Amino acid sequence: MSTTHAVHLTWLYVPGDRPDVVAKALGSGADVVLVDLEDAVAPDRKAYALDATAELLADRHEVPVHVRVNALDGPLAEHEVRRLAPLPGLGALRLPKVHATADLARVADWAVEVPPLYALLESALGVEQAYAIASHPSVHGIALGEADLRADLGISDAAGLAWVRGRAVVAARAAHLPPPPQSVYPDIRDTDGLARSCAEGRALGFLGRTAIHPRQLPVIEEAFRPTEAEVTAAEEIVGAAATEAGALALADGRFVDAAVVAAARRTLHLAGRTAPSPSGV
């Protein structure tokens, strides 16, 4: 994992045409507030959403604010990128339906100074081009848009996404990006199901998750924070690495190498995070 990219666990989507909701989201405890100009905004509210978002981004905020623009091949995205990219409060742009690096080049042409980009892979072609997209110098992260992927691939069961999910994790790692976050869990009342789904995603190599309601944030945070046993094991490994070089022999006879030590340090870094305080949005 590259140390030049911030690691986040919780990303909270909020509709761009609801500035009151956006204001509450900034105090929700989310690592990143994701202002959505695309799916969450009705066509007749798009212009207002852009105006409200531009007003928000005229100032910097303690919490990073990312914006998901509309489809790159549609009539709105170019204007949105040109207007938002120079603003001081913009943390990054989230790009829907990125199919290839040509889509990223298009965005770069629109912006005088290209902000960090996060690419959503939502089609078969996007998945096939995952490593090339993740390797683009302006891309700071990738993620799957699973609802659109299901439709594009004709998948009716989550098991059909197993290979696609693994592909995204591998592409991000190969490109030295943080592990991708999981896609949203749509049932905001089913926190037990959310926790189980997060555990499955963590086992596949995902880190963190996008959310659509603040009540999901502490569940996601807890699911991806290291357990007490994992912290203890990581402390033992890091402690041994401080006194020995090369492969290490632990007290129980296990040998660990530099990659395991690096993973242990990442575990301790995540363990030092503080859980968010739920807040109604």
Image: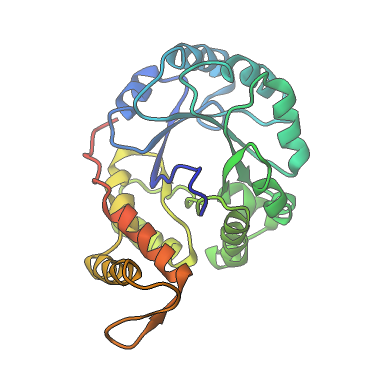
Q: Residue at x 37, y 22 (%)?
A: 61
Marks counted in the figure total 0
**Is residue 151 toward the left or the right of residue 90 in the image?**
right
Q: Is residue 12 above or below residue 269?
A: above
Q: In the rendering, at what x and y percent does residue 221 appear?
A: 31, 50
Position above or below: 260 against 139: below
* Residue 71, image quadrant: top right
- Indicate the position of residue 11 as horizontal and vertical percent values: 41, 40
Q: Would residue 191 be visible to someone looking at this image?
A: no
**Relative to residue 107, is residue 192 depicted above or below?**
below
Which image quadrant for residue 31?
top left
12 relative to 170 in the view: left or right: left
- Position of the C terminus by quadrant: top left
Q: Which of the 4 image quarters holds residue 81?
A: top right
Q: In this orientation, which residue lies closer to the viewer: 137 or 158? A: 137
Q: In this view of the protein, which residue sits in the foreground, 71 or 6?
A: 6
Q: Colour scheme used in the picture? A: rainbow
- The residue sitting at 32% across, 46% down in the picture is 216
Residue depicted at x 40% and y 60%: 197
Q: Is residue 36 visible?
A: yes
